[in-house]
Image (cartoon, rainbow, N blue to C red):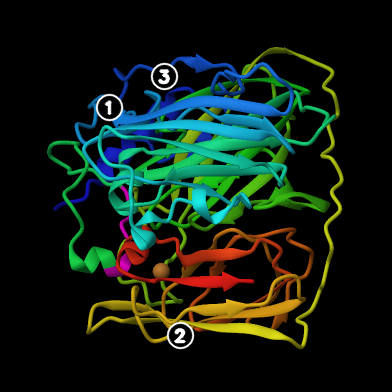
Amino acid sequence: MRYSPLLLGLAGCMSAMDMTTDSAADSGGDSGADTAELAPLEACGYTAMPDLDPADGAVEVNLTASALAWDPGTGVPLEGGMAFNGSVPGPVLEATLGDRVTVHFTNDTAMEMSLHWHGLRVTPEVDGIQQMMGDPIEPGESFDYTFTLQDAGFYWFHTHMDTATTIEAGLYAPIVVHAPGEVKPDCDLPVVLDDVLLDEDTLQIAPPDTSMMQLMGRLGTVLMMNGRNDRRVAWTKGQTTLLRLVNASNARYWDVYLEGHQLTVVGTDGGFLAEPYPVDDLVIAPGERYMVAVEATGEPGQSYRLMNKRVQLHEEGGDMIEVDPLGNGENPVATFVYGEGEVTGTGWTPPTPDVPAWGAPVANVGHHWLLAEDMMGGTVSIDGASWPDVPMVDVAQNVDTTFEVENSSEMHHPFHIHGNRFQMVEVGGVAVPASQGWKDTFDVPPRTTVKLVSALDNPGEWMYHCHILEHADKGMAGLMTVE
Ligand SMILES: [Cu+2]
């Protein structure tokens, strides 16, 4: 397989054509795309799945996974593509804290499936880990997922079998859970970040992964916001936008910034933060979420690009694969286009959550996970084994507990724990400076130990795994019993 630096160059050119800011000059776009048409200008916002239950406190939706040849923005529909309800990402599952949610799911694909409600504290029966427990939803079958929402904020759902294939194909969607009485920003925009690896010649999804790719993680050549590499979103000066960012990539760590704009992190995996903080750019590991407030301080008539910077997957100097499809370290992903005029925005500020802050490890250590990678043997492991041989972890419910995740390898691993939520208190021996709120997915840097604290309140058997999907599929996963 060959990788095409020009492929993504197309996105750069298309954005550059629309670009009137100073940075257009160094956008890296080359000639030859003058004939490319700009994507249509989209309103800022999202489409939610229709709620079939008119009652307050209940949300009922129909959801179907099926094959769909969708266009990532190259102009060539992906024959191996799949979609929820005919779109990539799938439409937003929108509800309110405390709602009883029923998802009537139909598997209209040719593959066995299960769905995982990433970050939501559901019950084990609907957590979607059939690849461990068996009894998947067969092609043509339906299954009703029912759960009550205990968490406001931003989550996502995705398939949880053959994830490296089915998520790459497009089976993911955002979940927005409002708090009762929550004040809405001028614009609320889920931003699903994903990359897809295309064959250079056919522009189709590249063939199944080689063993090397499984070890390194599958990095795409087309970087997309909400399923396309060329989206243009309409903005108005003065408004406040809440960007709800999730990294749905198989393996890529994103580092995003918005030209000419300040980002303020107002929430993470498990909801809003007590103390928002400004950032110039934001690294997002696979599976992680961040909620970011942006004031539209740009100039009417101007355009500003959402950019992604290069992030090494391996420790300093140790990159074994090229992570950057453009080769210049700066990849445009989408464009925010200001109309004329200006509005007096709501001056939105995020709701203030009640997030307990442990701040430091507690004496009771529940488990010390060891992540390892054997390049020569071609294996990834947790606690010395690969699933299904990883030993069960047993943890007491409702007891303040420290968890340690040690990464002995030279590569980053994004660690995801199902069914419960955690606070990061230490990374590599250094205290996490500000509360990151509740986390369920977090980066474990190379040769580093991350410490977390929680009093796990959701009993059951819960999966934990690396969210580099190739690693998860290769057995970098285990089960934890909370009781
Ligand atoms: Cu991993």
| Disc on res. 39 | 3
Q: Nearer the viewer, mark 1 or mark 3?
A: 1
Amino acid type assigned to the residue bearing label 1 in the image: Leu
Question: Which amino acid type is marked by label 2?
Answer: Ser
Labels 1 and 3 touching (C-beta < 8 A): no
Residue 425 seen in render: yes
Q: Amino acid at mark 3?
A: Ala
Q: Nearer the viewer, residue 4 or 385?
A: 385
Q: Which mark is residue 408?
A: 2
Give the mark nearer the N terminus: 1 vs 3.
3
Is disc 1 placed on a helix, strand or loop? loop
Q: Residue at x 47, y 61 (%)?
A: 311
Q: Disc 2 or 3, which lies upstream in sequence?
A: 3
* x 66%, y 35%: residue: 100
**Ligand 1 appears in which quadrant?**
bottom left
Magenta stretch: give its range.
Answer: 215-220
Query: 11 above or below 364?
Result: above
Percent across and percent down for residue 398 are: 75, 70
Residue 238 quadrant: top right
Where is residue 432 shown, x and y percent of the image?
73, 72
Marks 1 and 3, how far apart at CA: 20 Å
Q: Which residue is mark 1?
A: 68
The residue furthest top is: 340
Q: In the rendered view of the protein, which quadrant contains the C terminus?
A: bottom right
Which residue is painted at 22% across and 41% down in the image?
205
Q: Nearer the viewer, mark 2 or mark 3?
A: 2
Q: Which residue does the image show at 84% across and 18% down from the upper left?
A: 344
Q: Main secondary structure of the magenta part?
A: loop
State the SS at label 2: loop
Mark 3 vs ligand 1: CB below 8 Å: no
